[in-house]
Image (spheres, rainbow, N blue to C red):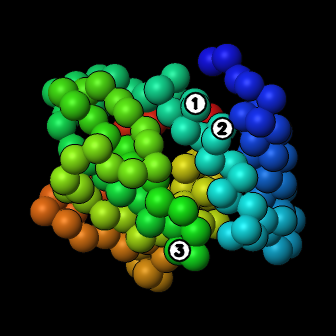
């Protein structure tokens, strides 16, 4: 994946926060990340999504997900017969809305924690015409 300078800086922040969270968890210390940092990681995460997509898991999938980062931006992740597109706004009707605590979403996306704890505590919530697809979302990608 080729990165421009802004996306490279986003990668560096994502990398540092990801390892910092893993170290903090191992040491039972507070996480070194806040919700304000997460929008800064999105340029890298969106750029890398096509490269870490598990094509066998999305083969034939047509669905539009809209991730609502609480107190932050939205991100549309759309599959058209398995082809992925990522944009700030959905290109069509949304099938699955995901309301996400930014830090919890970041932790789940990087594979540092399971989605089940944040789901159980309301930090990840979903609705829409096909909300069950949200349970599979993390499995569509390998953690970067």
- At label 3, counting other C-alpha atoms closer than 10 Å, the crowd grade (few under 14, some 14-19, many 20 or more) is some
11 or 123: nearer the viewer: 11
User: Label 1, label 2: how many angstroms apart (C-alpha)?
Assistant: 6 Å
Q: State the residue position of label 2.
A: 44
Q: Are marks 1 and 2 in contact (CB under 8 Å)?
A: yes
Which residue is denoted by mark 3 in the rendering? 70
The location of residue 21, given as percent across then percent down, is: 77, 58
Label 2 environment density (alpha carbons within 10 Å; few <14, some 14–19, many ≥20): many
Quadrant assignment, res 144: top right
Identify whether 101 is placed above or below 66: below
Q: Position of residue 8 (x, y in %)?
A: 78, 31
Q: CA distance from mark 3 to mark 2?
A: 19 Å
Secondary structure at badge 1 equals helix
Badge 1 crowding class, 10 Å Cα cut-off, few under 14, some 14 to 19, many 20 or more, is some
- Number of on-image labels: 3
Residue 80 visible at all:
yes
Kindly indicate the quadrant of the structure image that contains residue 29: bottom right
């Amino acid at each position: 994946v080729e990165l421009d300078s802004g996306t490279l800086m986003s990668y560096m922040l994502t990398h540092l926060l990801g390892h910092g969270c893993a170290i903090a968890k191992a040491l039972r210390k507070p996480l070194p990340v806040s919700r304000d940092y997460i929008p800064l990681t999105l340029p890298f995460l969106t750029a890398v999504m096509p490269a870490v997509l598990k094509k066998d898991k999305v083969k034939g999938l047509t669905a539009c997900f809209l991730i609502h980062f609480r107190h932050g931006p939205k991100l549309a992740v759309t599959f058209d017969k398995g082809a992925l597109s990522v944009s700030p706004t959905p290109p069509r009707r949304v099938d699955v809305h995901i309301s996400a605590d930014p830090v919890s979403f970041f932790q789940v996306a990087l594979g540092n924690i399971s989605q089940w704890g944040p789901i159980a505590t309301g930090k990840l919530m979903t609705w829409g015409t096909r909300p069950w697809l949200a349970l599979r979302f993390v499995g569509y990608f390998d953690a970067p």
